[in-house]
Amino acid sequence: MDQPGRLAPTPIGHAFLVPRRRVRAGLTQILCVVVGLAAGLAMPYIRSGPMIPARQVSEMLVALGLGLLGVVAVIFSLLFLVVQWAATTFTPRLLLFRDDPIVWRTFAFAIGQSVFDITAALAISNETDVSVVVPSLAVLALLATLTLIRLLQLRAFSAIQLAPVLASISSRGRAVFESVYPDTDRELPPLPTLPVIMTIEWHRPPAVLQQILVEDLLHKARDCHALVVFRVSPGSTLRGRLPLADVYGEPMPADAILDALVSGSERTFTQDPLLALRLLADIALRALSPAINDPATAVQALDEIEDLLSRVASVRADSIRALDQRGELRVVVPLPGFTTFVRTGLDDVIASASNSPLVLGRLRELLSHVAAHSESPNRDVLATRAGWVSQMSDGFRRREPPL
């Protein structure tokens, strides 16, 4: 028997069950500043171990504290350069380095240590001697900062190289796909045949739907005895008066549904399985542009696209269907189907590959390999693209000069 207040097992990808509101970078920095301030004020009270002159320690701490402020400038310079490089070389939607936790954690830790060093220096300035523990803690914190900076530099180098970037996007895409799509071996509950009670529309400024907090909405829909069927999925652009969801059963406050939506100015990987394919396709398109003309890069991007499409080809789930503890359907969220994945990852690349026999050949191989792992309906989608590629290849051969 289900315990009160707990939800029954339901075929939902865990990315929709676990709300993942990002902790703002500013909160992490404030926390590190507070910890550094408290630790610095506590230094005069440490009297264990050998004692050394306080004046020398105070001078050392001031030098360390002021020197670490230069590290902050280096972090921001590195962030600006890498983000600008990725935007101009790969795609402006590639923000993996900017959102990497190592960037903001290194920044926060450096600020916190600077506050600690300067506060401790002021706190012990009136002392004649202090414990050796005080400079030892400062040195250990400095070593930790240097370790974080080294990791940050290595991550920055990876963020400006093609192969690591493609591998990182593909890895994130696989992780999101596994966390978004439910267990396909379980039978999904049927969709309702009841009349629509109300339709919720978007009346706020345009934004991108980043997350749907299904678990929060599940409790609210259960309390209202309602069923919420969304018309949009994460990654969609929300515009004025766009229908978001239909409510069945009993009426439900619109704010209860809108509060369960996390929106922003750009797409994120949290619940958006199409984003990885969009980024890989963007990199391939830029490589195929007349200004770049780098078909080998497009082929590398197609290698990762093939891997993602092969994983998608075996999925049958078309929506998230969340049940309450009594087994009643409460929330339905549509998921992109195989055709949408193929359209996002391949159609634009195929249209831009007319003058590249290398890319056309790789596209034929890709479509053949993915079709081998696909079911019959998906093979029809791939066959249409294969015919398109064949026509473009024939046209390219006709344009070739005779030998």
Image: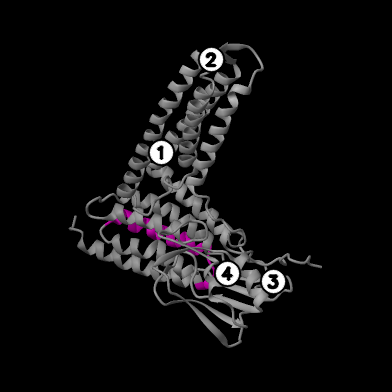
Asked whether 32 or 124 is in front, the reply is 124
Q: Give me the C-alpha separation between circle 3 and circle 1.
A: 45 Å
Q: Give me the C-alpha separation between circle 4 and circle 2.
A: 70 Å
Task: Name the residue: 47% across, 30% down.
Answer: 114
Q: Which residues are magenta?
A: 356-377
Q: Secondary structure at mark 1?
A: helix
| Mark 4 surroundings: few (<14), some (14-19) or many (≥20) residues within 10 A | some
Compared to 296, does 243 lie above or below?
A: below
Which residue is the site of mark 1?
156
Q: Give me the C-alpha separation between circle 2 and circle 3.
A: 64 Å
Which residue is the site of mark 2?
54
Asked whether 273 or 384 is in front, the reply is 273
Which residue is the site of mark 4?
316
Q: Amino acid at mark 2?
A: Ala
x and y percent of residue 54 in the render? 53, 15
| Mark 1 surroundings: few (<14), some (14-19) or many (≥20) residues within 10 A | some
Q: Residue 243 magenta-drawn?
A: no
